[in-house]
Image (cartoon, rainbow, N blue to C red):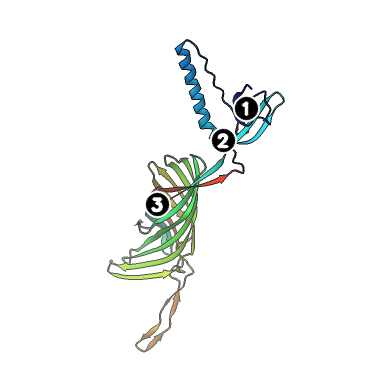
Amino acid sequence: MTIFPSLKLINGRVNIVVNSYATAKNLQILQVICFISLQKSRTYMRLTASLTVLSLAFCLIVTPVWAQDDVDEDLDGTTELVVQPLVKEKTFYASNALDMGIFSTSTLDKPGNDDALTPLRFTWFINFGININHDFSNNFGVFSGLGIKNIGFIERHRLLDSTVKRRVYTLGAPLGIKIGNLKKRNFVLLGVGADLAYHYKEKGFTHRLHKDKTREWFSDRTPLIMPHVFLGASFDPGITIKAQYYFNNFLNTDFTDQIPGGTIDGVVYPPIDFKPYAGYDVNLLMFSVGFDLHYKKVRLVEPKDKDKRIM
């Protein structure tokens, strides 16, 4: 039986085509016949032996990798073995949430004050999270995750020489894409996200001496959900910068506080309800710096239905 193997690419699959006078029913093992002619010339013998060794090595490496899915035989004696990989792998990996040091400001519009940027605020505690990434190729990937951020703004009252700092701790979930050279970590990232505000703190002081503090869990002073968009970039070896803009008002203008009543010189004063944030319009603008640190990769393997190998 004479066999002349060749390779064909059909519909994205590698096909091994064997021209043979034998039928497909009798073809069970792909044989490699190596014939070394004994010639008097040593040069010819060495060349032939080298080619034979390389052919055997190629067969040993390639044969275990592919599985036989189907065998087709033409009328002219050509037998076609259709082969494809045994398993299909998808790689997911975890990384940090890219927010470490956060510089924040805001556009502030309130009664008696024109729209202006508030003083710059910096915080690094606590800004931490985990992202789950999936790269479809070396140039495109997606990510999502969970992260904790410390966000807020500073308001200054120049006439009263006082300062008020307001901040919330949030638990956020981003959803973004990455475009660029992902392997070398040179890429652009953009997407959307939503933060859940779970702890509010307000601190006011005059001349940095007298201080008043307010702390509340799931406070009504701010919206519970804060949606935002972000745009950033990563540079080799993984230094990241990112800008975030929050759509909704940081303060709840319908929030109602109360000044307690009392008695002064025999006169009873009832409690007074008021809205401390009426007329406020505050939109946060943040810039963050971080590192794109990757953690252990997890491989999800999907086995094929057939696990036959060409021996």
Q: Is residue 110 visible?
A: yes
Please tell me how crowded label 2 is: few (under 14), some (14-19), or many (20+) other residues with Cα within 10 Å: some
Residue furthest to the bottom: 266
Q: Say which quarter of the image contains residue 156.
A: bottom left
Mark 1 and mark 2: Cα distance apart in space? 14 Å
Q: Quadrant of the N terminus?
A: top right
Is 68 drawn above or below residue 124 in the view shown?
A: above
Side (left or right) of 144 relative to 67: left
Please tell me how crowded label 1 is: few (under 14), some (14-19), or many (20+) other residues with Cα within 10 Å: many
Point out the tag, 3 or 1, that comes first from the N-terminus.
1
Report the amino acid beneath label 1. Val
Q: Secondary structure at mark 1?
A: strand
Give the residue pinned by disc 3.
287
**From the viewer's perspective, is the residue at label 3 or at label 1 nearer?**
1
**From the viewer's perspective, is the residue at label 3 or at label 2 nearer?**
2
Give 8 or 124, whichever is nearer the viewer.
8
Side (left or right) of 85 relative to 294: right
> Are the two marked residues, 1 and 2, in contact with CB atoms closer than 8 angstroms?
no
The total number of labels drawn is 3
Residue 71 percent across, percent down from the top left: 66, 33
Q: Say which quarter of the image contains residue 185.
A: top left
Point out the tag, 3 or 2, that comes first from the N-terminus.
2
Give the residue pinned by disc 1.
17
> Are the two marked residues, 3 and 2, in contact with CB atoms closer than 8 angstroms?
no
Residue 143 percent across, percent down from the top left: 49, 49
Please tell me how crowded label 3 is: few (under 14), some (14-19), or many (20+) other residues with Cα within 10 Å: some
Q: Residue at x 60, y 39 (%)?
A: 308
Give the residue pinned by disc 2.
66
Point out the tag, 1 or 2, that comes first from the N-terminus.
1
Mark 3 and mark 2: Cα distance apart in space? 50 Å
Report the amino acid beneath label 3. Phe
Give 88 or 309, whichever is nearer the viewer.
309
